[in-house]
Image (cartoon, rainbow, N blue to C red):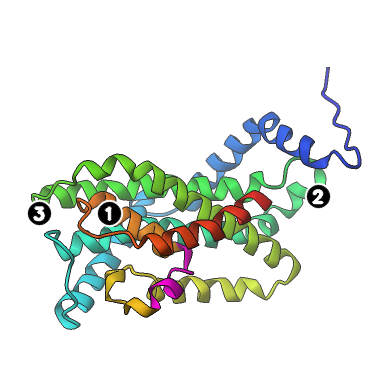
């Protein structure tokens, strides 16, 4: 017997979260479809998840370390410092780019049947999370190449992965809604991603930012996530700016709850 869904006024939020679990199979199908579509007809397939951050890491290492002569904190090689930041940034940028156009790309499906709409951008973020896990393999190879091992702080890495997921998902939902209402945002989002790469501490340490600007700089939610990744992977030698971390976390949590 087919299930019947009744939408009642005043009970939308309660039913909505219950339906997220009820439609978990659809969530899996959409995520798996997005994985297959992303690398369909590509020659090297999922290897792009490794090649893109690796090439960016090499370029940033040459520009900021060899040309600009910016210092690396602690004993970690500059390449590892950069790649530790590339991991969360690549995840965030991919998730934001893919999820922002997900509702428009699935307009035919959305208009034909009811299901929690949050599933569509969420499946895009999950695909980006899988890319992140694939890219993490390069981090392990860099540890071996440079004979560098993380310290005990690495046990907290799942916490910052969750923070990266919340940041990416919350931002993705925001830009998804804006993109549906204002189609001009599909041209703005690539600019936001590109601009964000250079104002986030990916190619350099956030400690180079003058102390009087550190709190303002931490309004960028990816600053605390990137600093957290480096703290976990670089033996704690890259300190976390806790005032900015608390500020960034306070701005992140209300957004997540409204989503």
User: Left or right: 245 with respect to 78?
Assistant: right
Q: Nearer the viewer, mark 3 or mark 2?
A: 3
Was residue 219 drawn as part of the magenta stretch in this picture?
yes
How would you rate the neighbour count of disc 1 (Cα within 10 Å): few for under 14, some for 14-19, many for 20 or more?
many
Point out residue 232 in the picture as x, y percentages from the top left corner: 28, 49
Q: Nearer the viewer, mark 1 or mark 3?
A: 1
Q: CA distance from mark 2 to mark 1?
A: 45 Å
Residue 37 visible here: no
Give the quadrant of residue 100: bottom right
Q: Looking at the image, which is closer to me, 165 or 137?
A: 165
Q: Looking at the image, which is closer to me, 212 or 119?
A: 212
Which secondary structure lies at badge 1? helix
What residue would you read off at disc 2?
A: 111
Task: Give, as a single range, the part of the protein colored magenta.
Answer: 213-221
What residue would you read off at disc 1?
A: 231
Q: Report the residue that reaches farthest toward the bottom.
A: 68
Which secondary structure lies at badge 3? loop
Q: Looking at the image, which is closer to me, 175 or 160?
A: 160
Most prominent secondary structure in the magenta stretch? Answer: helix
Residue at horizontal 45 percent and vertical 45 percent from the top: 162
Contact (Cβ within 8 Å) of mark 3 with mark 2: no
What residue would you read off at disc 3?
A: 146
For residue 185, above or below residue 9: below
Point out residue 210 in the picture as x, y percentages from the top left corner: 32, 79
Q: CA distance from mark 3 to mark 2?
A: 53 Å
């Amino acid at each position: 017997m087919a299930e019947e869904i009744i939408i009642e006024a005043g009970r939308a939020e309660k039913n909505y979260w219950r339906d997220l679990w009820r439609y978990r199979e659809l969530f899996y199908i959409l995520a798996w479809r997005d994985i297959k579509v992303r690398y369909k007809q590509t020659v090297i397939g999922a290897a792009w998840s490794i090649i893109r951050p690796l090439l960016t890491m090499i370029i940033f290492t040459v520009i900021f370390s060899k040309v600009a002569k910016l210092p690396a904190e602690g004993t970690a090689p500059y390449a590892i410092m950069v790649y530790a930041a590339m991991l969360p940034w690549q995840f965030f940028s991919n998730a934001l780019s893919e999820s922002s156009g997900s509702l428009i790309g699935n307009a035919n499906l959305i208009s034909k049947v009811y299901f929690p709409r949050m599933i569509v951008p969420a499946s895009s973020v999950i695909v980006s999370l899988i890319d992140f896990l694939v890219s993490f393999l390069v981090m392990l190879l860099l540890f071996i190449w440079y004979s560098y091992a993380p310290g005990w702080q690495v046990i907290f890495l799942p916490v910052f992965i969750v923070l990266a997921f919340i940041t990416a998902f919350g931002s993705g939902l925001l830009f998804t809604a804006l993109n549906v209402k204002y189609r001009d945002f599909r041209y703005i989002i690539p600019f936001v991603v590109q601009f964000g790469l250079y104002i986030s501490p990916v190619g350099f340490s956030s400690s180079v930012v003058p102390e009087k600007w550190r709190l303002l700089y931490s309004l960028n939610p990816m600053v605390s996530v990137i600093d957290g990744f480096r703290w976990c992977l670089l033996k704690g030698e890259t300190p976390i700016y806790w005032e900015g971390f608390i500020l960034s976390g306070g701005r992140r949590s209300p957004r997540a709850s409204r989503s």
